Image (cartoon, helix red, strand yellow):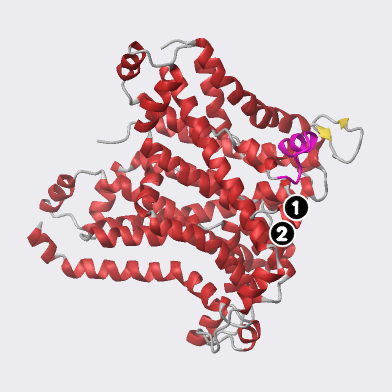
Amino acid sequence: MASNSRKYYKLYVVIAVILMVFALLIIAPYIWMMLTSFKSTREVLYNPGKVMPIKWTLSGYITVLTKSPFFSWFKNSVIVSVTVTAAVIFTSTITGYVFSKYRFKGKNFLFWLVLSTMMVPSQITMIPRFLIINQVGLYNSLQALIIPAIVSGFGIYLCRQFCDEIPDSLCEAAKLDGAGDFRIYASIILPQLRPCVAALAIFTFLDIWNDYLNPLIMLSTLKSMTLPLALTYFSDAHSTDISAVMAASALIMLPVTILLLCFQKQFIKGVTISGMK
Amino acid sequence: MKNNRFVYLVLLPIFILLAVFFVLPIVGGLAISFFDYNPLRAINHFIGFENFGKLMSDKIFLKSTANTLIFVGITVTLNIFLTLVLAQLISMLPWPKFRSFFRVIFFMPCVAPLIASSVVWGGLYATKYGLINNMLKTFFGISPVNWLGTASYVMPAIIIFTLWADIGYNIILFSAGMDGIPTDFYEAAEIDGAGMVKKFFYITLPLLGRTVSFVVAMTIISHFQMFAQFQVLAKLGGPENSGNVLTYYIYKTAFQTKDMGYASAIAVVLFVLIMIVTIIQQRLNRVEWGY
């Protein structure tokens, strides 16, 4: 391979340069967003040719933080995302364990039911789901986002696949030693599922943190909103204040981007493990 | 193992939630499509297939369906082409640090809320101060274009945005598949004098068959359901409904016009489109791929 490397060195440099150009196209919107968020709106409008801010200012950020309930939105997003992620991990792992390691009547049918929930697009279920949430009095509350998301068909499917790889003898040995069913789950199954749980946690958190359609349907008052929905309201209300809109976008995009940069390996592994979003 | 008490204890709450929030809505969604249903009215009449009959003469529905198919067709084709090429280029690099650097950069837009990146791109496309018009003016002297306000430009603008936002996933999936191909295949081909392009078409692509068919199906399904960027970049369906798609039309009909029966009928059409893709993919999956 060493001689190959030298032979192809020029080629590799060309490839790297091509990829660099594409990478630049990917990050350009981020750079523009950050630079615009540090300009004054006056400057954005009257000096569009200048890329760098002539005068750096935090006025956009100040508008976001003082003229909108940004911290409530942030808090709502954290509450919903963290609760759902924790709940999904618990329900998926324990249900996956039951489907993988227990024999019971109707197992195949029930598992088929779980799988079929993954196939149906949210557009067909969102209208009845809205009516149900309305009926039980959860409309415009964070529970409306949390409760329907507690069970994830995809999560159950993923965890069952991983449980199937754990040898049955491990569970049976523990049973002979007198461990109860929940005990086996907690002390034998759960530790073995670590890579699967990590992937599931990352993607559930992202899904819920970024979710726009559900909040759009279920929430109505400004203070109860989560960040993605709030951003559209903020950008409509401040549509002339471009630097404030970009500051708000930056504040919403940065947490997940930083998360990605900190946990690169887990993210990339998570994508390949879960096969899909 | 067997322990019915434990099994029921776990499954009962899970299936109650699934029944209330998945099974019931699926059945309900189909049922509502046969009603003239407005949530604000006390009595809603059963009207049989009337909602479905209305679809055929609804110009906005036909336009949205055409737009959806055009959007999905063009975006997915470009997406698969771009991601296969980029994944191949990345996995050819001999430096692991560079490979993971590029994968992470391309993945960045995938983790951001689609709605927030749409808002940012709304700024990039802005006529007066947007980066794109600025670049075009500086480098090519082209006068400002109203990208999102011109019927023929809205869809291309959204397609470009969607490519930017979504290529990261497939790049990672494809390069994971490429990493799994044994290197002796390439070495053997090299001895036979195969060049880069030949190696890609005769080794990488056939061996990636199953992955490609799965990724294509998943990408099509997810693109059929895209919504946020249309709401932001094609305001109210865009000029002359040029940016109206089924997801947006369903949302608007259900939650603004409050004609939930008709909206459900449109949703059933979308569901059927997605089911067709799913079935084709499953058929393809039975084909013998691999080595």
Left or right: A86 as drawn, with respect to A135: left
Q: Which residue is mark 1?
A: B60
- What stretch of residues is rendered in magenta? A129-141
Give the image location of residue B155, x and y in percent.
61, 62
Left or right: B81 as drawn, with respect to B57: left
Amino acid at dot 1: Ile
Q: Chain of mark 1?
A: B
Asked if the magenta segment contains residue A130, the reply would be yes
Q: State the mark number for residue B237.
A: 2
Residue A47 visible? The answer is yes
Asked if the magenta segment contains residue B92, the reply would be no
- Where is A273 relative to B75, above or below? above
In terms of depth relative to the viewer, which is nearer, B28 or A62?
Answer: A62
Q: Earlier in the sequence, mark 1 or mark 2?
A: 1
Left or right: B252 as drawn, with respect to A102: right
Q: State the mark number for residue B128.
A: none
Q: Residues within 10 Å of mark 2 (few under 14, many from 20)?
A: many
Marks 1 and 2 belong to one chain: yes
Looking at the figure, which quarter contains the C terminus of chain B?
A: top left
Q: Chain of mark 2?
A: B
Q: Residues within 10 Å of mark 1 (few under 14, many from 20)?
A: some
